[in-house]
Amino acid sequence: DTEVTQTPKHLVMGMTNKKSLKCEQHMGHRAMYWYKQKAKKPPELMFVYSYEKLSINESVPSRFSPECPNSSLLNLHLHALQPEDSALYLCASSQESGGPNYGYTFGSGTRLTVV
Amino acid sequence: AQSVAQPEDQVNVAEGNPLTVKCTYSVSGNPYLFWYVQYPNRGLQFLLKYITGDNLVKGSYGFEAEFNKSQTSFHLKKPSALVSDSALYFCAVRDYNTGGFKTIFGAGTRLFVKA
């Protein structure tokens, strides 16, 4: 299995809803990432997990809450989002932890619309 | 601070012609450089990387990139473009200062290959 699987592919939520995005990989990668991407822009890093521990939080608002239950799963819990949070949310994983030698494997993303 | 620049928003090329997508970088220390491709409504796909060694790096789908230390460039190339190569291309550098956890993406270049 050489894929990162993200669910759901599309999500529409109201500003008072609570929802979660899910990411799964079975490649044995020990670093996992959440990115946010606006249309025609590069991905922006949100969070990095290394060996199931949060390593980097790029000053993301608390309405986004990441969770790494085990080495294969990464969740992003969403609560009280704003319309400007509408974007493509990408999960990625990489083979190493702390070494820069490897590229990332990205999922196809969750297209989130906040209404 | 580490950074990459993609000077062209869009590159247009005729099918069968060679293509070049430009990237320049600014890093402290050794550069760890990557190219990714993104098709519409999809995640990014890893194409190739330069870590060390030969300046000409070969990657997926017939793409290659030339590392030039004196010009601080890492241009993506392909000898003969296909219509299916039309996509958004990102140059990226791993930020060694964060242990390589952080990948910094360029703004992206849209490649349009005309039949």
Image (cartoon, grey):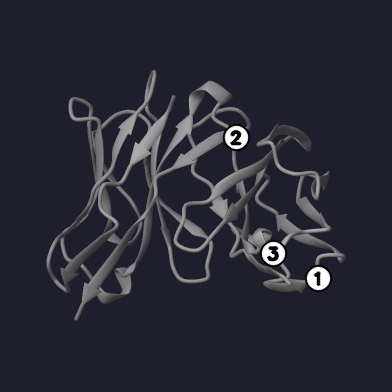
In percent of width and height, residue B30 lies at 37, 22
Looking at the picture, tell me which residue is in the foreground, B27 or A3.
Answer: B27
Q: Residues within 10 Å of mark 1 (few under 14, many from 20)?
A: some
Of badges 1 and 2, nearer the viewer stands 1
Disc 2: which residue: A96
Side (left or right) of A28 relative to B62: right
Disc 3: which residue: A83
Looking at the picture, tell me which residue is in the foreground, A19 or B94.
Answer: A19
Disc 1: which residue: A14
Residue B50 visible in the shown view: no
Local SS, label 2: loop
In percent of width and height, residue A88 lies at 60, 63
Q: Residue at x 77, y 59 (%)?
A: A81
Q: Residues within 10 Å of mark 3 (few under 14, many from 20)?
A: some
The reply to whether the C-beta atoms of the residues labelled 1 and 2 are less than 8 Å apart is no
Q: Which mark is residue B8?
A: none
Q: Are marks 1 and 2 on the same chain?
A: yes
Q: Chain of mark 1?
A: A
Looking at the picture, tell me which residue is in the foreground, A79 or B3.
Answer: A79
- Picture layout, residue B87 above or below residue B55: below
Alpha carbon distance from label 3 to label 2: 35 Å
The amino acid type, in three-letter code, at marker 2 is Glu
Side (left or right) of A51 relative to A108: right
